[in-house]
Amino acid sequence: MLSCKDVTERASDLIDGNLSAWDVLQMRLHLAMCKGCDAFIGQLRMTRDVTRSVAEAETRQSADAADIEAILCQLHESKQGDG
Ligand SMILES: [Zn+2]
């Protein structure tokens, strides 16, 4: 069984899809039982999504505070459907 430390160390690899199927399974088992790590991964994933969205907005050279706020609103709304 992975420890919380193991999970946090591998969190970014999990999100990036760099783990083996076995490692992913171990991570999922831990997350199913550990609310703390589950929340941590959720936060990290959301941060990744926001960073990516902002980077894309900047690529279009139209990023401003309103754009970022709209992106955050979209993420928040899409989260609510997840359960
Ligand atoms: Zn944990």
Image (tube, rainbow, N blue to C red):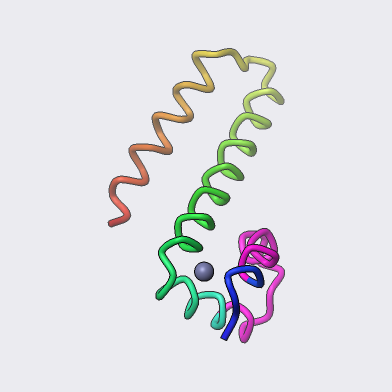
Give residue 34's quadrant in the image: bottom left
Question: Please, is residue 61 above or below residue 59 in the view?
Answer: above
**What residue is shown at x 47% (from left), y 21% (from top)?**
69
Query: Which residue: 62% across, 17% down?
Result: 63
Q: Is residue 48 magenta?
A: no
Pick the residue in front: 23 or 68: 23
- Magenta-drawn stretch contains 13: yes
Q: Is residue 1 left or right of residue 13?
A: left
Residue 47: x, y in percent?
A: 57, 42
Q: Quadrant of the C terminus?
A: bottom left
Is 21 placed above or below 9 here? Answer: below
The secondary structure that dominates the magenta segment is helix
User: Residue 73, how many percent across, how many down?
Assistant: 39, 29
**Range of the magenta residues?**
7-24
Residue occupying the point 40% across, 75% down: 33
Dividing the image into 4 quarters, which one contains the N terminus? bottom right
Q: Residue at x 36, y 43 (%)?
A: 78
Q: Pinpoint residue 17: horizontal percent, then vertical percent.
A: 66, 66
Where residue 25 sits, quadrant-wise, is bottom right
Q: Nearer the viewer, residue 20 or 29?
A: 29
